[in-house]
Amino acid sequence: MWLVDNVHAAHEAAVELLNRETTERLGFVLARPRFIPLGIDQYGIDFDVIVRPNEFIRSERKKSQSGNPERAEFLEQLIDAITPAAKAAGFTTVSGPHGG
């Protein structure tokens, strides 16, 4: 997740590129945090999601990746390597819709 205060076209393009070029188990999100008053001196946070993984592009990419097993294996190993740190940081899901 990439958090930005001011969203620029370059931010959107970068996240869309990452989502287009990575495995279906890895997705990137561009969001703008918004602080919401909950009471006196208390705030909550909400995220205005600007870009998220596109399932149509993911399904097309999955078809094209089947011809490159080395790349698919590398990306799977990458996800396996970052999963513990991401979960320790509070992320509940690290994989895509088909992963565990």
Image (spheres, rainbow, N blue to C red):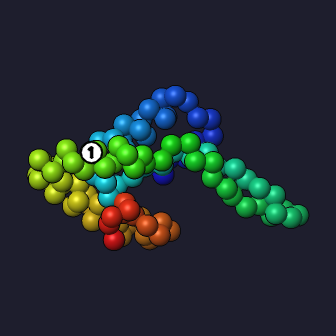
Q: Position of residue 74 (x, y in %)?
A: 18, 54
Residue depicted at 70% across the width and 50% down the height: 34
Residue 71, compared with residue 16, is above or below; it is: below
- For the image shown, how many numbered marks are present on the structure? 1
Q: Position of residue 52 (x, y in %)?
A: 48, 47
- Using the rendered image of the protein, determine whether residue 83 is visible from the camera's viewpoint: yes
5 with respect to 89 (left or right): right
> Disc 1 marks which residue?
61
Residue at the far top: name it: 9
Towards the viewer: 74 or 68: 68
Residue 14, compared with residue 94, is above or below; it is: above
Residue at the far right: name it: 40
Q: Position of residue 90 (x, y in %)?
A: 50, 68
Towards the viewer: 39 or 62: 62
Q: Quadrant of the C terminus?
A: bottom left
- Using the rendered image of the protein, determine whether residue 89 is visible from the camera's viewpoint: no
- Disc 1 residue type (three-letter): Arg
Residue depicted at 48% across the width and 29% down the height: 10
Under circle 1, the secondary element is helix
Towards the viewer: 50 or 57: 57
Residue depicted at 23% across the width and 54% down the height: 75
How busy is the neighbourhood of tag 1: few (under 14 within 10 Å), some, or many (20 plus)? Answer: some
Residue depicted at 12% across the width and 47% down the height: 68
Towards the viewer: 58 or 8: 58
53 with respect to 100 (left or right): right
66 with respect to 29 (left or right): left
Q: Position of residue 47 (x, y in %)?
A: 63, 52
Residue 16, compared with residue 29, is above or below; it is: above
4 with respect to 22 (left or right): right
